Structures are given as C-alpha cells and as structure tokens.
Image (cartoon, rainbow, N blue to C red):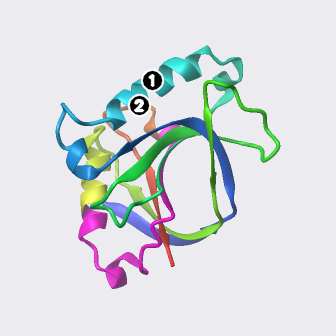
Amino acid sequence: MTSLKTITELPPMKLIGISARTNNTAEMNLATAKIGTTIQKYGEIAAKLENDKKLTKTYCIYTEYESDFTGEYTYFIGYEIPASGEVSVEFQVLTIPAQKYIKFTTGPGSMPQVCIDMWQKIWAMKPQELGGERAYLADFEVYDERASDPQHTILDIMIGVK
C-alpha cells in the first residue's frame, strides 16, 4: 500500500453524528470493540434522514484523547453541517477547532485493512517522520466517493499537529 503525505490547515468544522468512548486495545478484541457497532448504528440512523441522501463525505473523528493513541479517546462518526445548521435529536454535535494537519492519502486497498495499515504506520512514526508533534485535539478519516468500493478504498487520514 502506498500513501501520499501533505501538510494542510483547516478551518473549524461542525459535524453531527454519534460517538463512543474506547481505546485501541479494546478495538483489537471483537468482544470489547465499539467502533464497528458505532458505525453500524450511525448507518441505521443516517439512513432515516432525508437530507442524508445528499451526503458525499463521512468523517470518523478521534478526539478527547486521555493521553495519546494508547489511551482512551472518543470515536465520532458523522458528517459536516453549516455552522448554523440544525441538528436531529438522534445526533450529537462535534466542533473540530481550526488546526494544522498532516494528510495521509492511502493507496487503494480493501476495508478495513487499508485503514488499519495506515494507522499502524502513523503510530510507528516519530514526530520528524510524521511532519510534526501530534496535537491530540482531533484526528480523522475522510470517506468520500473514493471509498465507495470496499475492495479498492482510498481514504484520507488527517493527523492534527502542533
């Protein structure tokens, strides 16, 4: 799997979706993993919303870090809305602050392995390899039309840096 890395700055983003508190150790065990069930629940709720038919991007955010990637964090899945957008009672709101990011674009691969492989590479990187020291405010994956084929998924992973 090849990847492309670029530096970018993004303005604040307002998202609506659902979340779960977890950690990477729990996610390695099917009995304790929460991300998969959160994704499934989000899909069921989002399918009921009429405006969801126009969505072209889904964001999977890792935020509210206890420490670093080895500690607890909040996993949030949702989509971006205008800052003044209304929120369905079934969803939570998350605002990501403006931040500098290192953007990794994966090569095509099968899900979820393409995502897992990229995260493992990121976790192994020293700050100088990454492009800066991680901020642990918000990191996220972007799923757009390039992720529509689960056997040939391309996605962006945005890592917030100081």
Residue 110, percent from left and from top: 28, 38
The residue that appears at 35% across and 28% down in the rendered structure is: 37
Residue 136, percent from left and from top: 45, 66
Is 160 situated above or below 110?
below
Task: Give the amino acid type for the residue marked by disc 1 in the picture.
Answer: Lys
Instruction: Tell me the SS state at disc 1.
Output: helix
Q: Which mark is residue 38?
A: 2
Task: Give the amino acid type for the residue marked by disc 2 in the picture.
Answer: Thr
The residue that appears at 35% across and 61% down in the rendered structure is: 3
Q: Is 53 on the left-hand or right-hand side of 70? A: right
Residue 27, percent from left and from top: 25, 43
Q: Which mark is residue 41?
A: 1
Bounds of the magenta segment = 121-146
Q: Is 78 on the left-hand or right-hand side of 133? A: right
Is 89 situated above or below 3?
above
Kindly check if marks 2 and 1 are in contact, taking CB atoms under 8 A apart as contact.
yes
- Residue furthest to the right: 84
Q: Nearer the viewer, residue 141 or 136?
A: 136
Is 100 situated above or below 141?
below
Quarter of the figure with residue 129: bottom left
Magenta stretch contains residue 61: no
Q: CA distance from mark 2 to mark 1?
A: 5 Å
